[in-house]
Image (cartoon, rainbow, N blue to C red):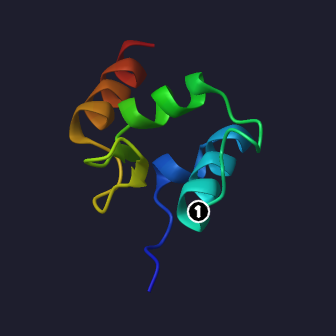
Amino acid sequence: MAKRPTTDTTTLGVRERMLLFCIASGTDWQRAGVTGETVTALVVKGLLVRDSVGRLALTDDGPSESYLDQRVHCVRCS
């Protein structure tokens, strides 16, 4: 059963959601027009990882703790 969306995943843009869909469904994300910058952003957010062969894979745990800490810090600063 799928996890319920968290606040962090509901704030993702169309490009990020498209990439997650492509990875989950096994679709070629490059043919779908997703950029490398989007891949990097989701890896930094902790939503994607590279497997042992270098392919992108969804994480089991959701966003990384360091990304969540950065978001809390940025919100407090503004």
Mark 1, other Cα within 10 Å: few <14 / some 14–19 / many ≥20: few
Instruction: From this view, report whether residue 72 is shown above or below residue 11.
Output: above
Q: Quick one: SS at disc 1?
A: loop
Instruction: From this view, report whether residue 1 is shown above or below residue 74.
Output: below
Instruction: From this view, report whether residue 60 is shown above or below residue 34.
Output: below
Where's residue 26, x and y in %? Answer: 58, 62
Task: For the C terminus, give its image quadrant.
Answer: top left
Q: For this rendering, which residue is in front, 34 or 44?
A: 34
Residue at 31 percent across and 32 percent down: it is 67
Residue, disc 1 = 26
Residue at the farthest front position = 53
Where's residue 11, x and y in %? Answer: 59, 44
Q: Is residue 48 left or right of residue 10?
A: left
Residue at 66 percent across and 28 percent down: it is 35
Q: For this rendering, which residue is in front, 11 or 45?
A: 45
Residue at 25 percent across and 47 percent down: it is 52
Residue at 47 percent across and 37 percent down: it is 42
Residue type for callout 1: Gly
Where's residue 6, x and y in %? Answer: 46, 59
Where's residue 72, x and y in %? Answer: 33, 30
Q: Quadrant of residue 15?
A: top right
Instruction: From this view, report whether residue 44 is shown above or below residue 4.
Output: above
Task: For the N terminus, give its image quadrant.
Answer: bottom left
